[in-house]
Amino acid sequence: MNGARLFLLATLVAVSGCAQNPGATLPLGSPGSALRSRTLLTSKITHVVIIVQENRTTNNLFNALPGAETVRVGMNSKGKPVALRPQALTAPYDLSHRHAAFTLSYANGQMNGWNLIISSCNKSAKCPRPGIRPYGYVPEGEVEPYYTMATRYAFASHMFQTNQGPSFPAHQYLLSGTSTISDGSPLRAAENPLTPQNKHTGGCDSPPGSYVALIDPYGNEGQPTFPCFTRTSLLDFTGAAGVTWHYYQAQPGPGLWNGVDALAQIWSGPQFSTNVTWPPTKILSDIDAGTLANLVWVTPTVKESDHAGWTDGTGPSWVATVVNKIGLSQYWNTTAIFVVWDDWGGWYDPMPPPQYNSYELSFRVPLIVISPYARRHYISTQQHEFGSILKFAEETFGLPSLGTTDVRSDDLLDCFNFNRARKFVPITAPLHADYFLRQPASDVSPDDDL
C-alpha cells in the first residue's frame, strides 16, 4: 500500500469518526438459526453473478413482456395522457436521472411530472421534443435476448431501484445496500461526483477537489464531500467466510460505475489490485480458466451499457454472451445470475415506488433471475430492491447482514425452486463472444450524464 493511500484512508477514518454520531451506527447482524436454514435452502449455489446494465425502467425496456405491468399511455403534469412512442435502444438523447428529476417525475405520488425533467439531444441528431422524450419504450425486436431470458427464467416486475438518483450512488447501493459516507451516517451520496473541471469522476483516486453532493434525512443536498467512503460493503465479510469475489469494470481509475473504487478500505488494500479487473470481457477467460469467483459483479463498457444516448445497442448481446459462457461451463449447476439495471435513466414508469425516507425508493428497474433453479416463465410480484440481491448473497454464503437496506429487503427466494435443476439452453443473440473480445479497450465514460 503506498503512502498516499495510507494517508487518505487514515484521514477519511478520522474525519468520518468526528463528523458522525456514533450512536447512529447500525449494528451488524450475525448468522443465526433463520439464516442457517436459508443457507441450507441455497446450498446448491456457490456462485452469485450480478450483471449490472444501465439506465432503464421496466416499462421502457420490457414494455411487451406479459405480466410486467407495463402501459403504453402515461400522464403529464397538466393531467393529459401521453401516448408512449417506440424509441430505439440507441435513441440519441439522454434524460436526467438526478434526484431532482426523480422528485419532479414522482410528483408526490401522482407519477405525472416526467415531462418536466431536462434532457439532452446528441449533436446533429433528430430527437423528439423535450416534453415527450421520457415517454418511450424499446421495441421488443431490438432486445430479443433480454425477452428470451425473462420468459425462460424469472423476471421481477416489482423490482425498485433503491436510491432516487443516478449511477454512482446506485453502484454503491449494489455493494453496501446504501451510499452513506460511513456506517450509520445520516448523509448519503446522492448524485454523480464531479471534478473541479466539471467532469464526472468517482472513487478514492478522483482528482483533488472532486466532490459528490450528499442528501440529508430532510432531502437537502447542500453538503458535498470527496467521493471516497469508509463504509462497510459485502466485500468486507467475504474473507472470514472463505468467499472469493471479483469486480469487472470497463477501465481502471475513477469512474461512475467503478463502485469498489469508492470503498476506502478495499481501494487501499491488497485485494483491489487482484480482484478488480478490466475490461469486462476478462470474466469470459476466467470462466474458461476455471477461476470464476464465488461473488461477482460485472459492469459494462459504455457501448454495451444500454445507457440512453451512449449505447451502440450491443447490450443484449453482451449480457447473453456472459450468460451463455456460464451456462455452457462447469459453473452452470452452481450459479445464480442476477441481471439488473442500475437506475431508471429518466424513462417513464407508471408504478409508484414506496417511500421510506428522503432518498429511498426509486422507480422500477428490470431484474432477471437466471439459474438452473430459477422458476420457468415466472413473474415475481413481490417487492424487491437492490438489498434483495445482497440478502440473497448473504444467505447463500452465510455472511452477516450489512445492517442497511438488506434488513428490510426480501431475499428473492420466490424466484427459485431448488428441487429441480434445468439444463442450459443457449440464448440466441446477434453478437457473440468473439465480437466483444475483438473490441479495443475503452476509457469512454458518459461525462455529460444528466
Image (tube, rainbow, N blue to C red):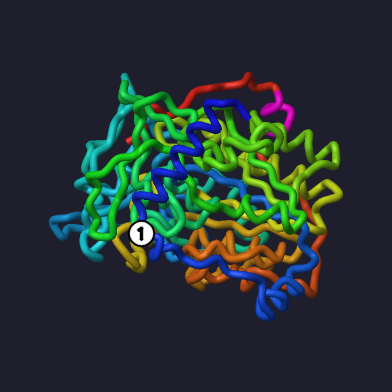
Q: Circle 1: is it few (<14), some (14-19), or many (20+) Cα within 10 Å?
A: few
Q: Nearer the viewer, residue 327 or 173?
A: 173
Amino acid type of disc 1?
A: Asn
Residue under the image location 61 percent in, 47 percent down: 51
Residue 435 part of the magenta-drawn span: yes
Relative side of 95 to 161, left or right? left
Q: From the image, give the main secondary structure of the stretch colored magenta.
A: helix
Give the image quarter of residue 280: top right
**Residue 312 visible, this orientation:** no
User: Residue drawn 63% across and 69% down?
Assistant: 415
Q: Name the residue under label 1.
A: 21
Q: Which residue is drawn at 28% across and 60% down?
A: 217
Q: In this view, does 259 lie above or below 303?
A: below
Residue 434 drawn at (x, y percent): 74, 28
- Is the C terminus in the top left, top right, bottom left or bottom right quadrant? top left
Q: Give the range drawn in magenta.
A: 431-437
Residue sitting nearer the eye, 107 or 10: 10
